[in-house]
Amino acid sequence: MNTRAKRTALPATAGAATVALLLPLTACGGDASADGNGSTVTVTVGYQSRTINTVTAGTLLRSLGYFEKQLNSLGDGVTYKVDWQDYATGAPITAQMTAGKIDIGSMGDFPLLINAARGKQLGKPTRLVSVTGYNLRGGLNTIVVAPGSPLTSLKDLKGKKVSTSVGSAADGTLVRALQRAGLDPAEDIEKLNQQPAVGASALDAGSADALSQFVAWPGLLAQQGKAKALYDGARLDLPTFHGVTAVEEFAKKRPAVLEAFLKAQTQATDYLDAHPVAAAEKVAKATGLPAETVYLYNGAQGIATFDPAIKPQLVAALKEDVSILKDAKLTGDVDVDAFVDDQYVKKALGPTAYTERLEATPPKPAGEVWPKGAGKTLSFTSPTALLRHVAGHRDEVRAAYVPDATTGTPWFADRAVWVADGGALLPFVAPETARAYVAGHGGARVVPYAEALELAS
């Protein structure tokens, strides 16, 4: 397993909270690693650099140095060492937390439930202390197929091999989507339990017929021309999110450190909101992902909305997720109410600001064009207007994004399925969604992207 570790020594900071970084299985870590006189404390943070919904608690936060600055302001006479550990999925982070080697970790909603269950089972209870990125309809997860695949609907997956990471949010999307399509996830497909990168390779090699994954894999493969969307997870209309979990013992022993982490996470969130293009470039540089893919998810109108507040809709969705994991025999019952603990983020933000964030809603979907060399994007409320601009500036466009006409999920304009309906041009993430629209609108028809550009110009 690929891990990247970096240790930064810094003097303690005032009135803030700490985050634990993931350590490799062989490393000693966590808050337990203090020197003999107690003047040095190591905080271990586990994160997933390429799961870019977690950047405000991982990749972006690390690159900005906000957590270290918060620790430097504590003024408690302690020297803190921060260990950042990078993993591909949430499962190894949970393993490290229950082994006492990670203090704070970030992961998706389904892994969070497994984290809660394993922590309780192994006597190392954890708590959900904040949220990173979320989508209230479920658009963070997508099922894709190879570019030349004849598969065009979920029903076409019957008897096929589908790669996913069992126990992940993407697996949950796959299970629910198949059930809604009238298929049995346990009997009607052959599920391949694979890490995202392995699944992407399997799809490319033809050993998997489809891939159900979380950010940023579907968008990355689509941008690279290695996949096309089969199913937009937002059609489930069920919230998906990623969050931050902390070992309960650590949170109680070092609440100021955890508060410092959550303050730093909030700063990183505000930076992303204020500088979405610069943030995308920073994450791209740190991960090797194309900045255009990062922006698809984390941009001003991206698939993800970032906010550390633990919204009631997300907690309710988490409770609904328990049954999926129980049916897969990955957990038993999970006491979600006991797992969720927003006292630390409330204190970090202040009660008024926290209430305001709880009530905040995602921005209204709009299209965006990212001009080459520009530090800002251009916004368009009409897909037709966006296409007209692209058609007139073909050599000047770095990327163009359009929201699905039904679900609002942003997608690359040149990878979307386009429908001409009278004078309107409407984008869709997946062909099945486009066909459903056409079936209900007489005269509407699916058109290639090149034709859509011509019709708009």
Image (cartoon, rainbow, N blue to C red):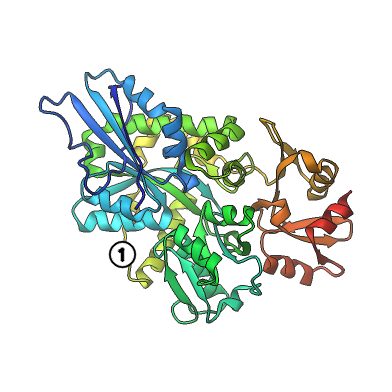
Q: Which residue is drawn at 68% across and 32% down?
A: 376
Q: Where is residue 94 in the image (x, y as percent from the top left)?
A: 30, 52
Q: Which residue is drawn at 57% across and 34% down?
A: 273
In this rendering, does residue 99 appear at all? Answer: yes
| Residue 258 occupies quadrant | top left
Task: Report the residue marked by disc 1.
Answer: 333
Density class for disc 1 (Cα within 10 Å; few <14, some 14-19, many ≥20) is: few
Q: Residue at x 36, y 26 (%)?
A: 68
In this rendering, does residue 137 appear at all? Answer: no
Name the outermost residue toward the front. Answer: 205
182 left or right of 88 in image: right
| Residue 249 occupies quadrant | top left
Task: Answer above or below: position of 27 versus 235.
Answer: above
Q: Which residue is drawn at 59% across and 30% down?
A: 275
Task: Answer above or below: position of 294 versus 108.
Answer: above
Q: Position of residue 54 (x, y in %)?
A: 45, 44
| Residue 251 occupies quadrant | top left
Q: Which amino acid does label 1 sit on?
A: Asp
